[in-house]
Amino acid sequence: MPLSLPAAAAEADAENAALEPELINSPDADRLLQWIAATGDNGEKPYIVIDKQAAAMLLFDSDGTLLGETPVLIGVGVGDESTPGIGAKSLSEIGTAERTTPAGRFAAHLGTAVGWKSVLWVDYAGSVALHAVVKDNKKERRPQRLKSETIDDNRITYGCINIDTSFYLKQVKPSFKEGGMVYILPEEKSLEEVFPLVRLLPFLEQGQPGSTVAS
């Protein structure tokens, strides 16, 4: 028997949902989010948190309201720093170990790049941008990697951050029209090495309304 329209729509939604991998924040992501909320470090600007360990991205408005989350593709190289001068190299000159997505706090802005009408520049000097997923090289299967259930295949880029095209156009681009902050979590260094002020989080939480501070 053919499905009714409502039933067919529900079945289609279920199938589409099954294509989206479940996103789980790492403990470091939760701590960083608490610190941003406690300090207002984003400076009343929208912000993004890239959790490399979970291959996921969280997008927030200036008030800290979660606008959405989506899987990411990141650099194939494991590491938390960009090679000095890498922004001046051509892609063919960048070795595999150099293809890292750097960790840190970045003031990001929309712009253009070769072959792209719109990217979110995270680290312009290091040529690290967040943009819609690259589909030119079908052998890399980047769209499929984004939708896979495992995060083991999310390392493929030269250091840039790739996300779903629709999410970039409908969520990121409108939110960052006046710029914003991007926080990229480390994978080799500790959270405190990259974000030293996170050490103050217990004291910041003590000072919040409803807490008791010993005198």
Image (cartoon, rainbow, N blue to C red):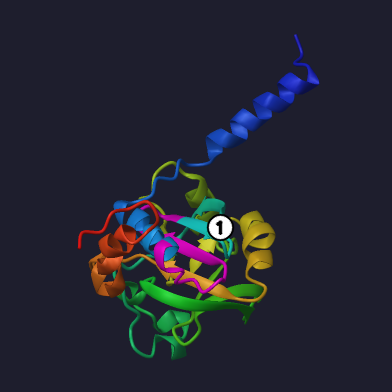
Work out whether 24 lies above or below 30. above
In the shown orientation, is residue 111 left or right of residue 194? right
Q: Position of residue 119 (x, y in %)?
A: 61, 73
Q: Which residue is found at the position 56% from the left and 71% from the top?
A: 44
Q: Residue furthest front?
A: 215
Which quadrant: the N terminus?
Answer: top right
Work out whether 150 lies above or below 46. above
Q: Residue furthest left?
A: 215
In the shown orientation, is residue 36 left or right of residue 201? right
Can residue 176 be seen in this snapshot?
A: yes
Q: Secondary structure at mark 1?
A: helix
In the shown orientation, is residue 161 left or right of residue 11? left
Among the 4 quarters of the image, the one containing residue 215: bottom left
Q: Residue furthest right?
A: 5
Q: Which residue is mark 1?
A: 138
In the rendered structure, which segment of residues is drawn in magenta? Answer: 38-56
Can residue 53 be seen in this snapshot?
A: no
- Residue nearer the viewer, 156 or 104: 104
Work out whether 35 lies above or below 128. above
Q: Amino acid at mark 1?
A: Lys
Q: Position of residue 205 (x, y in %)?
A: 32, 58
- Residue nearer the viewer, 93 or 196: 196
Q: Position of residue 7 (x, y in %)?
A: 72, 19
Q: Residue furthest top?
A: 1
Q: Which residue is found at the position 61% from the left and 36% from the top?
A: 16
Q: Which residue is found at the position 23% from the left and 66% from the top?
A: 190
- Residue nearer the viewer, 42 or 118: 42
Mark 1 neighbour density, 10 Å: few (under 14) some (14–19) many (20 or more): few
Q: Position of residue 71 (x, y in %)?
A: 49, 52
Magenta run includes residue 204: no
Among the 4 quarters of the image, the one containing residue 110: bottom right
